[in-house]
Image: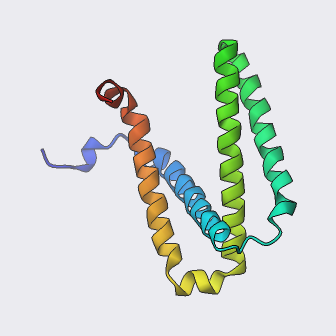
Amino acid sequence: MAYSQRNVPEGFVARIGLPIVACTVVLTLGFFGILALATGQAAGLELRVPVYVFGAALTFVGAIVGLDQMHRDGVTIIAVATGAAVVAFAVLGLGGEGALYVARYTEQVVESRRFLYLSAAGLVATGLGYWALRHARSVRPSA
């Protein structure tokens, strides 16, 4: 069966495009953050860590309140909130350091083509994440 535009639900590209772009940008900045930390080019990190911790704390409380409003059980609430806070700390920390790295070393990032490589890696990771979310149920039984 040939692929045609008739197979794409109306509004699909608009509905899925923004999350794909946002996730790719966040992951790309996270990869730059890893690069900044690995190369020792994250000067002043100790001054920014409290901001990342505060963001994780906000995420933790937001997840607790949100899940409680959804009437989830207590164990699920605390487990999911803790996981969300850890992920938030990682995303904020790596993304923040990545953004600073790109801002500080823009010329080096562009000249070395790191931006293209890490953007491609972010896009692939976004695609894998999308696939995993859409097909987790079918993969679990075989794992």
Please, which residue is most extreme toward the left here?
1
Seen at 66% across and 59% down, the residue is: 95
Seen at 26% across and 44% down, the residue is: 6
Q: Nearer the viewer, residue 107 or 9?
A: 107
- Total count of labels: 0
x and y, in percent, of residue 12 in the image = 41, 44
x and y, in percent, of residue 11 in the image = 43, 44
Quarter of the image containing the C terminus? Answer: top left
Q: In this picture, is 75 found above or below 5?
A: above
Q: Is residue 11 visible?
A: no
x and y, in percent, of residue 125 in the image = 45, 53
Q: In this picture, is 132 found above or below 108?
A: above
Relative horizontal placement of residue 138, taking residue 109 as reference (left or right): left
Q: Nearer the viewer, residue 47 or 7?
A: 47
Seen at 63% across and 19% down, the residue is: 76
x and y, in percent, of residue 43 in the image = 79, 72
Please tell me in which quadrant of the rendered image residue 139 appears: top left
* Colour treatment of the image: rainbow
Please tell me in which quadrant of the rendered image residue 97 appears: bottom right
Q: Is residue 24 visible?
A: yes
Seen at 57% across and 60% down, the residue is: 25
Q: Nearer the viewer, residue 77 or 126?
A: 77
Quarter of the image containing the N terminus? Answer: top left
